[in-house]
Image: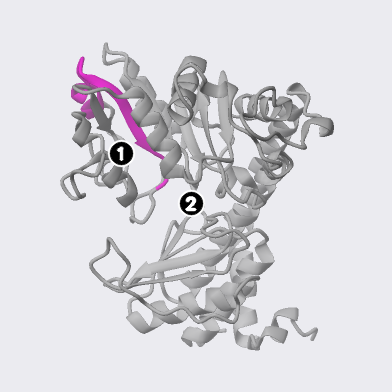
Amino acid sequence: MTKSPYQAFGISPAVCALADRAMQAAGPAFLRIDTVREQNQLRVIRALHEARLSEAYLGGSTGYGYGDTGREQIERAFALAFGAESALVRIQISSGTQALALCLFALLRPGDELLSVTGKPYDTLQTLIGTEDAKQDSGSLHDLGVRYREVGLTAEGWPDPDAIRRAISNRTRVVFIQKSRGYTMRRALLADDIAAICAAVRASGFSPVILVDNCYGEFVETQEPCMLGADLCAGSLIKNPGGGLCPSGGYVAGRADLVERVASRLNAPGLGSHVGPSLGFSRLIAQGFYLAPHTVAESLKGAVFASAMLSLAGFATFPDPLAERGDIVQTVELGQPDRLVSFCQAIQAASPVDSFVTPEPWDMPGYDVPVIMAAGAFVQGASIELSADGPLKPPYPAYLQGGLCFENVRLALMLAVEKMGVIPRET
């Protein structure tokens, strides 16, 4: 019998056998992921062709960034690949939250209403909006006189088109959709869900701007939000669309007039998208975008494998191995605090960077319980790279995401099962 190469990392034959069973269980999902990857990869290549991306212009610009042809070619390619009229792709946008903040502050004025139709957004956006749970007097939308309301998803996690239609009024300026489930147990939205929401908004008789938080969801499916009726979508280049190469950056894509308003918010009215030096990062942005469909597929395969292997080890996982996915996040309920700690420590130990570091739970600002985080990434906070974290409270969930190559995710899960000592007897 041939010895598994994973045994060189201290993996026992029993865990290798369990991993082989997980690979068999994940097979149908892997085939579906490969089909999606092929379609997305070809769409990106076609976009790069139509944008006439040229190596001669990838050197970048400095200062004001006027006349940056490479930047313009990249933004044209993003727009084409995302089914949008225009795109703003800038290294100066350091996070998905910043990209969304630019959109919201560009579109909303005192007296306007922001309506979230996917329930409560994640923590950083709550601070940006100024919800009841967030600190006030922080320069939030609430402080500027913007009203906020939300429509929750159904108990099963589906959008409620009738409730959405009823909630929209002449004050509703922006309808907000969060595609990813973030750190919750709800399902991520699929393309059909976003299309149904957009149809409900259009049927309301009013004309608010539909904005989609696309973080963690790019290239997971073959359709992006602007193809489904959304006016704008936004995200981070250290997540899916950066392909694991971008050291920072963010994007906004959608209607040309709205994108230009966002550019004016980023820079200044009158300057808009005309300024913004690329500072030599155009090559990494373009190459990362080219690799993004492949990298996202690797990450998705890792998530599916994690779900399959941890299910076989006796844990509740969400989504299930064969479920349709709208984002790259995988959740597992570990049930005990020591198992959550061991799990995250194993993910760190398998990482290509800082594998020698041992993460421990700590009192992270904004959380009412200690949180443990594992992330050995080439780029700080890059969610497309392998990471895991979770709060130390029942049911002790771990949120796993990312992975630039599937083999690294597989190794990490095998180490985690080994470290937790939860190998089923039948293996």
Is residue 142 rendered to the left or right of residue 399?
Answer: left
**In this figure, what is the number of numbered marks?**
2
Give the residue at mark 2. 323
Q: Position of residue 394 (x, y in %)?
A: 26, 72
10 Å crowding of disc 1: few (<14), some (14-19), many (20+): many
Q: Secondary structure at mark 2?
A: loop
The part of the image, by quadrant, that contains residue 351 is bottom right
Residue 401 location (% of width, % of height) = 51, 59
**Residue 304 visible in the current orientation:** yes
Secondary structure, mark 1, is: loop
View extreme (front): residue: 63
Residue marked by disc 1: 118
Given contact means CB atoms under 8 Å apart, are the residues at marks 1 and 2 in contact?
no
The image quadrant that residue 69 belongs to is top right
Residue at position x 64%, y 58% in the image:
27
Q: Position of residue 221 (x, y in %)?
A: 56, 39
- Farthest-out residue, left: 132
Magenta-span inclusion, residue 1 = no
Residue 116 left/right relative to 423: left
For the record, the magenta segment spans 162-180
Q: Residue, x 79% and y 86% (percent of image)? A: 1
Which comes sooner in the sequence, label 1 or label 2?
Answer: 1
Residue at 59%, 61% (x, y): give it: 302
Residue sticking out furthest to the top: 205
Q: Amino acid at mark 2?
A: Ala
Above or below, 274 against 334 in this view is: above
